[in-house]
């Protein structure tokens, strides 16, 4: 018996009626970048089904170099495997979604940040860069960062959104744009 036991039982239920999804283009042609917060699960919040959309999650849903690297590879892979099937409109829309009440918001406070740096060994600058205190501001900064990256393929568009944990509603801050 581990904490995983009840979850594995749910998986057993899931597998009973499971239909495999073949490797293909994400049906929604969207890639979601968002926070790892367990109240912000894109499958539930956006109604994603298997095969709909890749999801990249980290603390805050920040556009870090690691996120940019993953997006560059995904775009390359899609071009290699499915180049002929790609729609005229391009490859994907990358939807960056930040949220209210983010646990990284505490990192905007210098005293808290200093404590966190001492306890984790992470550089204060790294912690400061992951803070989402004002999701509308950070999502805008991250969309701009992604659009400015030379690794982002030109066929990809980027949009920015904020999820309100209190209402369950997503507001679009920046409409989809090409680099
Ligand atoms: Zn968060």
Image (cartoon, grey):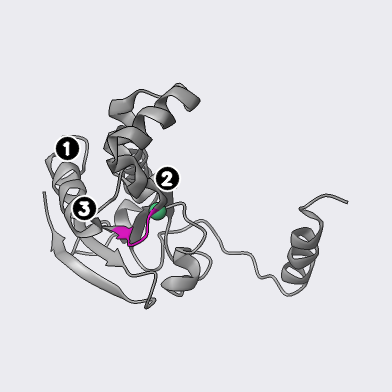
Q: Which mark is residue 156?
A: 3
Q: Residue 123 falls in which quadrant of the image?
A: top left
Estimate the spatial distance between the alpha carbons at disc 1 and disc 3, rounded to whole Å: 12 Å
Q: Which numbered mark, 3 or 2, is in the foreground of this view? A: 2
Which residue is painted at 29% across and 40% down in the image?
Answer: 109
Percent x, y of residue 141: 16, 47
First of labels 3, 2 by sequence position:
2
Estimate the spatial distance between the alpha carbons at disc 3 and disc 2, rounded to whole Å: 21 Å
Percent x, y of residue 136: 20, 59
- 85 relative position to 2: left or right: left
Which residue is painted at 32% across and 43% down in the image?
Answer: 71
Which residue is painted at 45% across and 21% down in the image?
Answer: 121
Residue closest to the eye, 101 or 109:
109
Residue 118 in the magenta stretch? The answer is: no
The residue indicated by pointer 2 is 58
Q: Secondary structure at mark 3?
A: loop
Q: Residue furthest front?
A: 111
Percent x, y of residue 15: 74, 67
- 71 relative position to 40: left or right: left
Residue closest to the eye, 110 or 53:
110
Q: Secondary structure at mark 1?
A: loop
Q: Is residue 30 visible?
A: yes
Dot 1, how many residues are within 10 Å of its Cα: few (below 14), some (14-19), or many (20+)?
few
The residue indicated by pointer 1 is 149
Q: Residue 93 falls in which quadrant of the image?
A: bottom left
Q: Is residue 99 above or below residue 150?
A: below
Percent x, y of residue 75: 31, 46
Q: Which numbered mark, 1 or 3, is in the foreground of this view? A: 1
Q: Is residue 154 visible?
A: no
Q: Which mark is residue 111?
A: none
Question: Magenta segment range?
Answer: 97-102
């Amino acid at each position: 018996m581990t904490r995983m036991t009840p979850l594995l039982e749910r998986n057993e239920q899931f597998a009973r009626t499971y239909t495999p999804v073949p490797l293909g283009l994400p049906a929604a042609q969207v890639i979601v970048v968002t926070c790892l917060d367990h109240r912000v699960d894109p499958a539930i919040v956006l109604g994603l089904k298997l095969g709909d959309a890749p999801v990249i999650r980290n603390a805050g849903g920040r556009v870090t170099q690691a996120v940019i690297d993953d997006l560059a590879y995904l775009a390359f892979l899609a071009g290699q495997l499915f180049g002929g099937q790609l729609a005229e409109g391009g490859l994907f829309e990358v939807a960056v979604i930040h949220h209210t009440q983010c646990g990284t918001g505490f990192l905007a406070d210098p005293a808290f940040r200093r404590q966190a740096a001492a306890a984790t060994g992470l550089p204060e600058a790294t912690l400061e860069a992951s803070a989402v205190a004002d999701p509308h501001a950070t999502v805008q900064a991250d969309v701009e960062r992604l659009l400015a990256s030379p690794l982002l393929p030109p066929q990809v568009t980027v949009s920015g959104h904020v999820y309100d944990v209190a209402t369950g509603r997503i507001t679009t801050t920046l409409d989809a744009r090409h680099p």
